[in-house]
Image (spheres, rainbow, N blue to C red):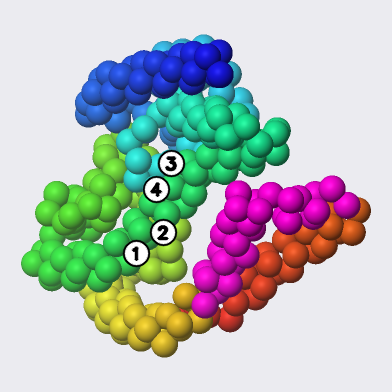
Amino acid sequence: MTILIIVVLFFIAILLGLIALYMWYAAIKSSPRFEVRRRLRKLAIEQNEGLPADLRIKILIEMSPLDKLLYKFKQVRKLDGLIDKAGLKIDVKIFCLTILVMAASGFVIGLAMKRGIIFPVIFMLICGFIPFLYLQVKKAKRINQFTDQFSNALDMICRSLKAGHSLISAIQMVGNDMAEPVAGLFKTSYEEQTLGLSLKDALANMVERMNTTDLRFFATAVNIYREIGGNLSEILENLAHTIRERIKIRRQVRVYTAQGRLSGYILFLLPICMAVFFYFSAPGYIEELFNTKIGIYALVFAIIAQFAGFLIIRKIVNIRI
């Protein structure tokens, strides 16, 4: 018992030390200089032909050995892209460290329960998955915020074009006057042009950072306008009207499907909560599932059926507009 308490206290001390180190690191990395260097590094890694060769080599030389090692892996580059899409100002190294700390915390919590090796492994996997779940939630929330604001951004671009400003000036105006996340995306697109990228490549990068149907329509309309001309302001006005109508219909659909979504969550979580309850209240009753062959088969079938039912309900209530 004493050794376990010492291990837990030692782990808590390490965790607090890592949190303090992260706060110091975040204070340094929140500067605009670091943000510009991060964007340049991403361009140098992904855009082999978008930057001059001497500039790309200079940017890659300034990268730390750990960054060069991590960015060799495709999964790390995808994770960095997901962090960018979620709108988090955090380095991929810190995020990977957060995953390890969360997984280790879950493992220690499972050991403290003294219920064998099953619970430490389960808690380790659950806690290690929490940062990824947080990224997905932040990404979905950011997409919804962008969709709500994008029609107003299109109206601002239309008014700017009708006033005689250029499209580049209109993009800069949206980046300066709108709120996040629309402002950050348009500001980044404008700054990428000042670094040497064409408008087409800058819009393609913006679509990659916020991959929505509305933004793809906007990028396509701008590219067609730059190639063959036309009345861009009228096209963007119609697009803004379409976006507002689709948002209205989508909200009505969410109201109509709220009961189905709630039923899916309850049916998915209720067996898990009941299994945990019986495991602690009547261990001998629930352990038959783990100690017998038929129980293991029944448990595997129940898990598969549970996930299949949840996915089916989600597919039914997830109506794409």
Q: Which mark is residue 67?
A: none
Q: Residue at x 79, y 55 (%)?
A: 289
* Residue 55 among magenta residues: no
The amino acid marked with disc number 1 is: Asn
Q: Residue at x 34, y 45 (%)?
A: 87
Describe the element under mark 1 as helix, strand or loop: helix
Describe the element under mark 3 as helix, strand or loop: helix
The answer to whether marks 4 and 1 mark residues whose Cβ atoms lie closer than 8 Å is: no
Look at the image and tell me in which quarter the N terminus lies.
top right
Sequence-first disc among 2 and 4: 4
Residue 253, position as x, y percentages in the image: 41, 85
The answer to whether marks 2 and 3 mark residues whose Cβ atoms lie closer than 8 Å is: no
Look at the image and tell me in which quarter the C terminus lies.
bottom left
Quarter of the image where one finds residue 91: top left
The residue that label 3 is drawn on is 83
For the image, the number of numbered tags is: 4
Q: Which mark is residue 140?
A: 2
Residue 24, position as x, y percentages in the image: 27, 18
The residue that label 4 is drawn on is 86
| Residue density around tag 2, few if under 14, some if 14–19, many if 20 or more, within 10 Å | some
| Residue density around tag 4, few if under 14, some if 14–19, many if 20 or more, within 10 Å | many
The residue that label 1 is drawn on is 144
Residue 127, position as x, y percentages in the image: 53, 39
| Residue density around tag 1, few if under 14, some if 14–19, many if 20 or more, within 10 Å | some
Sequence-first disc among 4 and 1: 4
The answer to whether marks 2 and 1 mark residues whose Cβ atoms lie closer than 8 Å is: yes
Q: Is residue 210 visible?
A: yes
